[in-house]
Each structure stands twice: as C-alpha cells, then as structure tokens.
Image (cartoon, rainbow, N blue to C red):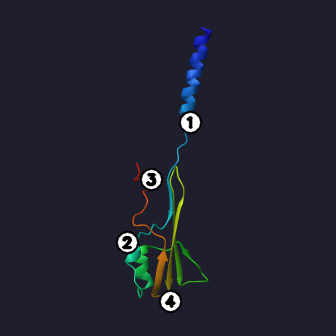
Amino acid sequence: MRSFRLITLLTFCALLLGACSIYRVDVQQGNAITAKELAELHPGMDELQVRTILGSPLLQDPWHPHQWVYAYSFKPAYGTTEVRKVLVLFDKDGKLISAQGDVHSTVPPTAATAS
C-alpha cells in the first residue's frame, strides 16, 4: 500500500511538472519593408508619396528632418533576432534623394501566420 501511494504521488508530480512548459511568442517590431516596396521608390518623389508606400517612419530625428529611418526586428520564439534598417534621404524641398537598406523579398512570418 505504501509503495502504491509513492508511485501515485510520483506520477502525479511528473504530470504536474510536465504541464509547466514555457510558451514563447514571436515578436515583430517596426516597419517590415520588402524589396518590392523599396523598388517602387524613385528619386523626385515627395514625402507623402514615400509615406504612402512605406508607411510612417519609425524614427524622425529632429536634428536631421530630411532623414527617415525605418527599423524592423523579428524575434522568433526559438531562434535568433533578425534586424533590418532602411534609410530614406530627402533634399531641402522634401523630394526623395535615395533610399537604401537591408531588405528581403518577403516579410518573415508572424505569430498569426506561423500556426
């Protein structure tokens, strides 16, 4: 009888500890810019046209108002963090000079689409 109680107690504890797994989620932050969106940009576009294609910039430096930074990071639940940055430069009249950065052809899967 004593060994039955011990086995039952150990089985219960093992089942209880097995239910204590850690759930992790994918974390996506910033503007996910694709190569297709970056290819749509061309010199001479105004700020509103760029904002329409890429969205609002994540960073707009008050000391450099003609420089927009689009930053993006993706941290999968179990993996390494991917960080990308796109820099968009305008002239004094608000016309696009250049847009450069590290982008990929597709956006990484989000937690909603990865299930």
Residue 53, image x, y percentages: 40, 75
Q: Amino acid at mark 4?
A: Asp
Mark 4 secondary-structure assignment: loop
The residue tagged 1 is 20
Q: Amino acid at mark 1?
A: Cys
Comparing labels 2 and 4, the label whose residue is closer to the camera: 2
The residue tagged 3 is 111
Q: What's the distance in space between the residues labelled 3 and 1, CA to CA?
A: 21 Å
Instruction: Identify whether 20 is placed above or below 79.
Output: above
Contact between labelled residues 1 and 3, with CB atoms less than 8 Å apart = no
Q: What's the distance in space between the residues labelled 3 and 4, CA to CA?
A: 38 Å
The residue tagged 2 is 36
Residue 33 sits in quarter: bottom left
Classify residue 36 as left or right of residue 80: left
Residue 64 sits in quarter: bottom right
Crowding at dot 3, Cα within 10 Å, few <14 / some 14-19 / many 20+, comes out as few
Q: Amino acid at mark 3?
A: Ala
